[in-house]
């Protein structure tokens, strides 16, 4: 994992839910950028508001017509990275938490470790792996900004350094102290939670429903994951025992991948 020494100069997104109209321009920009294709909705669902392997960001609509964008928070000390035994998830020095689909063995420890329930499994793949928002790492590495923030017509979700985003959040709160939640002492969600994150929110409603529960605390979560616990001798024994099961999962995944490649080659030859 790359160490980030100056979190203020890493990149971040600020979402101001008071400006979001729920137009989903950001959702479609993301889908287009990553060619995520059509959502596979359950028949009884008329509106898709959950993340999925084809939806890295989504809009949750609350009673009263409040719209809230959901995506990976790009934690400063991500539990998903710490939980991943094969290094498929990485914290980059610029801020985004990325993943390498080819390394992922599909064990889903990251899904269990994430305090916000973000990573999604590609169930429809014969060799399932995990996917999530990567904060458009390639775009920001090239000096650009995420497709979602660039596309928002209302400035409801914006991009900059973490220091700039915190400053902008404070500016909006100072200018409209009664607009934001909790009234009287508005909160910048993500400034301190789980050690701080790179996707910050300000809102006129409580965002507990999005996983911002006070019980999460301000301590980073990685200390509780296998990555850290495996360094404690008695726990390491348990981890070693579990590794044999994990090697079985990796082996099965490699076999399935080889079979899928063989089938594709065969179809090409027949075709
Ligand atoms: S929100 Fe979850 S998936 Fe995203 S960086 Fe944090 S721990 Fe990882
Ligand atoms: S930052 Fe990029 S990957 Fe993440 S939701 Fe926005 S467009 Fe999608
Ligand atoms: S594009 Fe902007 S206003 Fe539209 S849903 Fe996304 S965040 Fe909200």
Image (tube, rainbow, N blue to C red):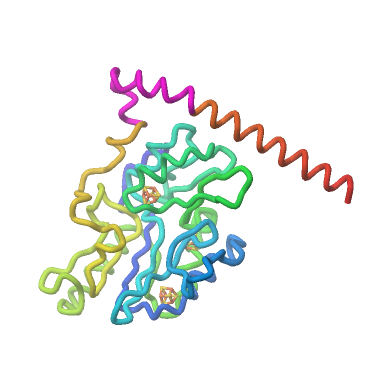
In this rendering, the count of numbered labels is: 0
Q: Quadrant of residue 54?
A: bottom right
Residue at (34% x, 49% y) in the render: 75
Percent x, y of residue 264: 78, 45
Depth order, front residue of 3/231: 231
Vertical comparison of 45 with 224: above or below = below
Task: Give the position of the N terminus as an image quadrant.
Answer: top left
Residue 126 versus residue 145: which sits nearer the camera? 126
Q: Is residue 94 left or right of residue 64?
A: right
The residue furthest front is 44
**Extent of the magenta region:** 227-245
- Give the residue furthest to the right: 270
Query: Residue 6's spot in the image, x, y percent?
Result: 31, 46
- The residue located at (44%, 67%) in the rendering is 58
User: What's the residue at 51%, 62% (across, down)?
Assistant: 55
- Residue 64 to residue 226: above or below: below
Residue 90, how many percent across, how many down?
Answer: 45, 42
Where residue 145 appears, as percent x and y from the top left, is 48, 63
Compared to residue 22, the image places residue 210 above or below, namely above
Q: Main secondary structure of the magenta part?
A: helix
Q: Is residue 244 magenta?
A: yes
Q: Is residue 156 magenta?
A: no
Q: Residue furthest left?
A: 184
């Amino acid at each position: 994992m790359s160490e980030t020494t100056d979190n203020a100069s890493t990149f971040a997104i600020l979402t101001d839910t008071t400006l979001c109209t729920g137009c989903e321009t950001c959702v479609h920009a993301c889908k287009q950028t990553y060619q995520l294709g059509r959502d596979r909705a359950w028949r009884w669902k008329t509106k898709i508001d959950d993340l999925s392997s084809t939806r890295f960001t989504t809009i949750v609509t609350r009673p009263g017509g409040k719209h809230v964008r959901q995506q990976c928070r790009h934690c400063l000390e991500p539990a998903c990275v710490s939980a991943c035994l094969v290094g498929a998830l990485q914290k980059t020095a610029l801020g985004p938490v990325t993943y390498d689909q080819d390394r992922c063995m599909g064990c889903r420890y990251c899904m269990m470790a994430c305090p916000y329930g973000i990573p999604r499994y590609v169930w429809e793949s014969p060799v399932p792996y995990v996917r999530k928002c990567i904060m458009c790492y390639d775009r920001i590495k090239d000096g650009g900004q995420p497709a979602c923030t660039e596309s928002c017509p209302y400035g409801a979700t914006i991009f900059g350094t973490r220091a700039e985003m915190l400053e902008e959040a404070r500016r909006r709160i100072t200018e409209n102290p009664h607009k934001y939640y909790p009234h009287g002492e508005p909160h910048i969600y993500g400034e301190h939670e789980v050690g701080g994150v790179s996707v910050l929110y300000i809102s006129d409603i409580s965002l507990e429903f999005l996983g911002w529960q006070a019980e999460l605390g301000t301590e980073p979560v990685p200390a509780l994951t296998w990555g850290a616990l495996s360094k404690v001798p008695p726990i390491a024994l348990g981890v070693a025992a579990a590794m044999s099961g994990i090697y079985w999962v990796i082996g099965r995944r490699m076999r399935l991948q080889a079979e899928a490649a063989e089938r594709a080659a065969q179809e090409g030859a027949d075709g």
